[in-house]
């Protein structure tokens, strides 16, 4: 886009005052990017590992259990991706509601922005509560 | 109406009316998002409900039509929605038309390659005889 008199183009990252609406909007982008780039790469590897045989699946499983200094970094990454998924999920539902023209009243808008943050943390905890139960 | 070199971008298109294609990508991203709403919930619930996450159990799950078909739909929809989303972000940060088109092309290629590889892996799981 070349314009003779450059006008400000979106997104104006530096001019927003921090608040739930702004935070959730930025998180929608960051979480969407993370689950696309990192999440789908892991999904593809996971499927290829199942298809590849016991040895290739063992390699994937040892990656998931990778520990350094006693900390299971990959499990933490997967938990972070789960949170990114749920945040994008709830924020996406909010966006669809906003697309209908509803929910722009200041208090309502702020309330549901905060609720996506609370919902994603709760859903992540619940998901891993059940997932780790499976591993027993 | 003179549309010489001096016309502004707005002036060049004013009065031409709608091309009726403007909403296409916007709508498509909403359609895939609603599909993913269901497919991603299916994926998470399936993983939680499986009695174990070892290779044998996962293979059994993905060999059945109830595992393989939604997984194929999830792969196609997730890669499509993900690439579309990354393109929107690129459009906002890259204002040079040449770079923008080049990165759109690269994202398309990466998305199609990832989806094809994932679908191939799924097909191999689904169509490999259990005894082998």
Image (spheres, grey):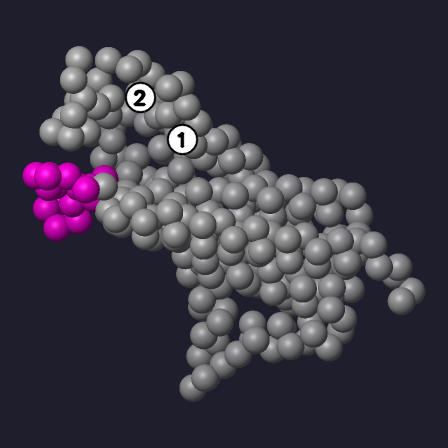
Magenta range is A2-21
Do tag 2 and tag 1 residues touch (Cβ < 8 Å)?
A: no
Residue B129 in the figure: left or right of residue A65: right
Which chain contains the residue that carries disc 1?
B
Q: Dot 2: within a 10 Å radius of its alpha carbon, few (fewer than 14), some, or many (20 or more) residues?
A: few
Asked where in the image residue A7 lies, by quadrant, the reply is: top left
What residue lies at 40% left-to-right and 31% top-to-bottom? Answer: B26
Q: Which residue is mark 1?
A: B26
Q: Is residue A42 above or below residue A118?
A: below
What residue lies at 47% left-to-right and 61% top-to-bottom? Answer: A38
Asked where in the image residue B41 lies, by quadrant, the reply is: top right
**Relative depth, front residue between A63 and A70:** A63
Which chain contains the residue that carries disc 2?
A
Question: What percent of the width, then of the height, locates residue A107?
Answer: 20, 29
Q: Is residue B32 above or below residue A60?
A: above
How many labels, in total? Answer: 2
Q: Is residue A65 above or below residue B110?
A: below
**Relative depth, front residue between A2 and A73:** A2
């Amino acid at each position: 886009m070349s314009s003779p008199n450059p006008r400000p183009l979106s997104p104006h990252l530096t001019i927003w005052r921090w608040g739930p609406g702004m935070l959730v909007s930025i998180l929608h982008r960051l979480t969407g990017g993370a689950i696309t780039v990192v999440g789908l790469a892991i999904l593809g590897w996971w499927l290829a590992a199942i298809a590849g045989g016991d040895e290739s699946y063992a390699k994937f499983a040892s990656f998931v259990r990778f520990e350094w200094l006693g900390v299971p970094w990959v499990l933490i990454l997967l938990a972070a991706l789960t949170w990114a998924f749920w945040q994008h999920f709830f924020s996406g539902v909010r966006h669809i509601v906003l697309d209908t023209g509803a929910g722009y009243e200041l208090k309502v808008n702020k309330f549901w922005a905060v609720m996506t943050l609370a919902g994603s943390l709760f859903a992540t905890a619940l998901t891993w509560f059940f997932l780790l139960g499976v591993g027993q | 109406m003179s549309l010489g070199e001096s016309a502004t971008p707005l002036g060049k298109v004013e009065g031409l009316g709608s091309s009726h294609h403007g909403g296409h990508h916007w709508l498509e991203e909403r359609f895939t998002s609603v599909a993913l709403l269901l497919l991603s919930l299916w994926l998470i619930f399936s993983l939680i409900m499986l009695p174990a996450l070892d290779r044998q159990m996962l293979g059994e799950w993905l060999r059945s039509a109830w595992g393989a078909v939604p997984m194929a739909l999830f792969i196609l929809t997730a890669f499509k929605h993900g690439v579309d989303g990354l393109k929107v972000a690129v459009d906002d940060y890259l204002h040079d038309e040449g770079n923008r088109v080049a990165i759109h092309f690269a994202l398309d290629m990466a998305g199609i390659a990832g989806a094809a590889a994932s679908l191939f892996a799924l097909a191999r799981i689904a169509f490999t005889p259990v005894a082998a």
